[in-house]
Image (tube, coloured by chain):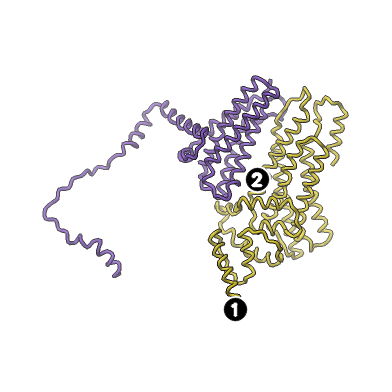
Amino acid sequence: MADVEDVNKPLFAGLSDVSIAEDIPVEGDIAVPVRSQSGDDEISTLDEPVKDTILRDLKAVGQKFVHVLYPKKSSALLRDWDLWGPLLLCVTLALMLQGGSADSKDDGGPQFAEVFVIVWFGSIIITLNSKLLGGTISFFQSLCVLGYCILPLTVAMLVCRLVLLGSMGVGGFIIRLVVVTASFGWSTFASTAFLADSQPPNRKALVVYPVFLFYFVISWMILTFSPSH
Amino acid sequence: MANTDFHLQFQDFGDDADLMAGSTGTTRITIDDHTTKPQKQRRVAGVAEEDETDPLESDDTDKLLSGQKKNAPFWTFEYYQTFFDVDTSQVKDRIIGSVVPWPGKNFVRFYIRNNPDLYGPFWICATLVFAVAVSGNICSFLVNYGQPQYKYVPEFRKVTIAATAIFSYAWFVPLAVWGFLMWRNSKISQTVSYSFLEIVCVYGYSLSIYIPAVVLWIIPSEPLRWCSIILALCLSGSVLILTFWPAIRDDHPRVVIAVTSTIAVLHVLLAVGCKAYFFSTYETTENASGPASVTKGFLTTKAH
């Protein structure tokens, strides 16, 4: 008790001696300053045209696409994650994988739902795996990164379809093989660039391998796409 | 003098124990018996030991140690994290250990050391599923390459079939083996008993030899395929049998033979079944070579 008083004494010692002779005029503003930024946002997003809202989101998605195409260790992808980009990419990929060997035989290419399931289910399993191994990344951040890094493979799918319009022979196959392999390496490299930092150091390979397998399976689906004539 | 010697010895173990506690964060058990400390040392440091300890002693300490591990209730995330508590080097060692049958090093005691993981079994099975599907696809494509009426199809359905077969082998057979061992345990007291997860681990890692074997099967040469399948079967089958031998050797001889042969037969069935279904050399549908090759194809698939 005596110690507490001793500690308090120097703090408040001077105050008791203070006496103010006259009134000191005090000025100020009691009103809480409204943060103009949030105020503007709240008011303006209700009133702004829909086009602006959509364009803003599209710009965010596009910015993340650029981050994927030129992967540097930036945290922009992780900080403001969104799932619009992965959804867009997944739907595009699944649509482009349609229209191939859709004959009466069952053993055809993957259906739309199969591609969807593989991409999303695969991403969820990889995210769970990295979290179980002790990763510090959050669930949706990881989904966001894995989804965005499908972009090179979607571009490769586009290129493959164009090549298949032209030639179906061995030359076309070699071109497709090279393009798909390059984009597979790009995707894996990009996603490890974003995910690697959040893993414990002696388990990095354990986390990277499922990502490798995931993009390998998607690359295989792209490479084996054969259109029906 | 003897006392101070003992004290010095104890001091050494104390340093290492601090090191262990600092590095892994596991709760330390203050067991006065100094023979258990080397067990913990070896387990945590992951150093390869040359001499195998007495199974009785290691079994007791492992039972004591296993009680400390899964503290979290099963509905929390941390509970499942305890099944993924492995490093890259540990997984690599376990995979290598599953294909090299060493009579002195029991797979469970030596490599798993009371730290069964689900990472290995799950991802090895997943890799094997995709390897089988992709290799089978490549193989059928290569075989039918020259024929004009052949239309390449990715055969996506086969992935689901492969997944069902391999995952059910990797989970239901360990369940059956574990149930059987528990039942025999109640009748005849065994010195060695394995937990369910350890058996799942053994079976999961034993499938790892099939991945390179499956990739080799792309080469369309029957003798090579049969050589690789027999080699893979011998290696992983012997690791399996060596693992389960201490658990059943005290049993009735007929039961021993039955269990051993069942384990071996199931292993063989999986390998040969995969080969027959996914890598049947001759397509039975439109084939320009004629009926002779079709019958040969039937004979090939029926040969096992």
Q: Position of residue B282 (x, y in %)?
A: 81, 32
Query: Is A120 rendered above or below residue B193?
Result: above
What residue did someone put label 2 on? Answer: B123
Mark 2–mark 1 CB contact (< 8 Å): no
Q: Chain of mark 2?
A: B
Residue under the image location 57 percent in, 65 percent down: B16
Find residue B297 and name its label. Answer: none
Earlier-in-chain disc, 2 versus 1: 1
Q: Position of residue B170 (x, y in %)?
A: 71, 48
Give SS at disc 2.
Answer: helix
Task: Decide if residue A75 is on the left or right side of residue A225.
Answer: left
Chain A, chosen colour in render? purple
Q: How many marks?
A: 2
Task: Decide if residue B208 is on the left or right side of residue A60.
Answer: right
Q: Amino acid at mark 1?
A: Asn
Q: Amino acid at mark 2?
A: Trp
Task: Decide if residue A70 is on the left or right side of residue B59.
Answer: left
Query: Is B155 rendered above or below residue B50?
Result: above
Find residue B3 and name its label. Answer: 1
Residue under the image location 34 percent in, 33 percent down: A43
Q: Position of residue B247 (x, y in %)?
A: 75, 60
Residue under the image location 72 percent in, 56 percent down: B179
Q: In this rendering, do the residues under marks 2 and 1 share a single chain?
A: yes
State the yellow chain. B
Give SS at disc 1.
Answer: helix
